[in-house]
Image (spheres, coloured by chain):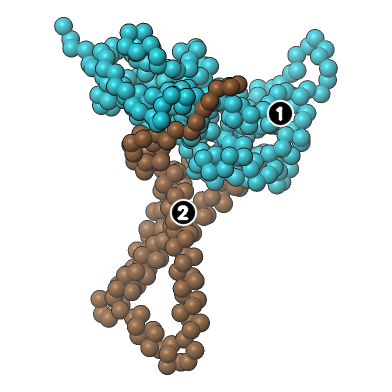
Chain colours: A cyan, B brown
């Protein structure tokens, strides 16, 4: 019988209402081929410790609920296979620099507040007419990448500028702003550009590229932010 | 999260935080070093201006130059040159980003520029080294 690999998950535990400070609990388990960190955490929840708190929904990298800090990288727990992580010890913590509610669950409210500040919806010119708002493949290709955002908060958590300035909109909110400003069907681009044209908007980005490295959907927020900057400086037409 | 208490918990253990340099990615290192070299250059410029400003006569200036004309100082100058070359070329890289150039290949751009910087530094070192050994 082939020996199953054993892995120890070191899981961050913290309940601000009870605990004085955080600690790490160890859970050892057999790892099957293809097993993800998410499955490991659910195994802990099922058979080892029922009190572990974590947030998840889809388990297939679409909902963006299970963003965590795993072995020194920002990852989605459901998209990270234990086999791919080197070593027999895997450190699992909540998203850094976010307030912890309990264990791996962080308070996402400040993050969603930022996203909500850039008018993250389509503002169409005409009232609903029963017909589609047409868009050419070329027009769509501009926003192909930004549309993929699942609002997991990883880029926001990874950005040194959000660590040091609470009011900074952050890479996710600014990418969302770009997604609608660059959308050919949208008419509120000027309003949105005005919203992000501030010290704590597009101008706070220092091109550290942590967000680009961390994004589980391979979105490039830096490119989106720099595009918004060029739109603000030379106008939207010329910036293409 | 109404009514629920939450707190920013400092993740304990160095390797487990994103502030641990071992977890830095290239862009993070470059950003950090850009800040560091900026501070070094600022400190150098201030001290440089003070030194020049306080040597009022030709003779005091000459004795000052004689003091600086020694291998240790020349080696430090080579280090300073490396700091300035790094800061200049990375500053150029950041400006290119604002022009919409190289954002998608920032790492290649960085290493390419550092290659140019290494050549610039080597060229300067070849000129300066005889002074270091001969002083």
Q: Which of A73/A44 is in front?
A: A44
The residue at 52%/16% (across/down) is A62
Q: Are marks 1 and 2 in contact (CB under 8 Å)?
A: no
| Horizontal side of residue A88 vs A145, given as left or right | left
Q: Chain of mark 1?
A: A
Q: Which of the 4 image quadrants contains residue A4? A: top left
Q: Which of B27/A20 is in front?
A: A20
Residue A209 point in image, percent of width and height? 49, 40
Q: Which of the 4 image quadrants contains residue B107? A: top left
Q: State the mark number for residue A34.
A: none
Name the residue beneath numbered marker 1.
A119
Q: Is residue B47 visible?
A: yes
Above or below: residue A117 compared with residue B25: above
Tag 1 secondary structure: loop
User: How many labels sit on residues?
Assistant: 2
Residue A182 point in image, percent of width and height? 68, 31
Local crowd size for mark 1, using a 10 Å CA cut-off: few (<14), some (14–19), many (≥20)? some
In space, the residues marked 1 and 2 are separated at their CA atoms by 34 Å
Name the residue beneath numbered marker 2.
B34
Q: Quadrant of the N terminus of chain A?
A: top left
Q: Quadrant of the C terminus of chain A?
A: top right
| Horizontal side of residue A171 vs B67, given as left or right | right
The residue at 48%/59% (across/down) is B38
| Horizontal side of residue A187 vs A183, given as left or right | right
The residue at 44%/56% (across/down) is B36
Q: Chain of mark 2?
A: B
Q: Which of A49/B33 is in front?
A: A49
Residue A69 point in image, percent of width and height? 41, 28
1 and 2 marks on the same chain: no
Above or below: residue A115 compared with residue B86: above
């Amino acid at each position: 019988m082939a020996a199953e690999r054993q892995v120890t998950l070191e899981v961050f535990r913290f309940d601000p209402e009870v605990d004085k400070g955080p600690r790490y609990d160890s859970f050892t388990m057999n790892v099957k081929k293809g097993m993800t960190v998410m499955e490991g955490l659910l195994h802990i929840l099922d058979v080892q410790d029922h009190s572990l708190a974590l947030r998840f929904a889809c388990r297939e990298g679409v909902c963006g609920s299970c963003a965590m800090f795993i072995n020194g990288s920002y990852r989605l727990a459901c998209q990270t296979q234990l086999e791919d992580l080197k070593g027999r010890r895997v450190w699992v913590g909540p998203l850094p620099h976010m307030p912890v509610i309990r264990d791996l669950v962080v308070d996402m409210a400040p993050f969603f507040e930022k996203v909500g500040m850039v008018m993250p919806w389509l503002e169409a010119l005409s009232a609903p007419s029963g017909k589609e708002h047409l868009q050419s493949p070329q027009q769509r290709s501009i926003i192909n990448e930004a549309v993929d955002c699942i609002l997991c908060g990883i880029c926001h958590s990874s950005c040194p500028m959000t660590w040091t300035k609470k009011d900074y909109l952050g890479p996710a909110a600014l990418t969302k702003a770009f997604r609608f400003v660059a959308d050919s069907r949208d008419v509120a681009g000027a309003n949105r550009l005005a919203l992000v044209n501030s010290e704590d908007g597009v101008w706070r980005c220092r091109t550290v590229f942590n967000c680009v490295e961390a994004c589980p959907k391979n979105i490039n927020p830096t490119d989106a932010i720099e595009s918004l900057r060029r739109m603000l400086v030379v106008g939207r037409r010329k910036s293409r | 999260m109404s009514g629920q208490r939450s707190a920013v918990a400092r993740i304990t253990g160095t390797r487990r935080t994103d502030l641990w340099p071992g977890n830095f990615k290239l862009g993070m290192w470059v950003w950090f070093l850009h800040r560091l070299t900026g501070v070094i250059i600022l400190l150098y410029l201030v001290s440089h201006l003070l030194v020049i400003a306080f040597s009022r006569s030709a003779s005091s200036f000459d004795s000052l130059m004689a003091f600086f004309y020694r291998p240790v100082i020349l080696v430090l100058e080579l280090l300073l040159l490396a700091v300035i070359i790094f800061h200049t070329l990375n500053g150029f890289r950041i400006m290119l980003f604002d022009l919409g150039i190289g954002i998608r290949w920032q790492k290649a751009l960085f290493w390419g520029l550092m290659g140019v910087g290494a050549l610039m530094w080597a060229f300067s070192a070849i000129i300066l080294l005889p002074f270091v050994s001969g002083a």
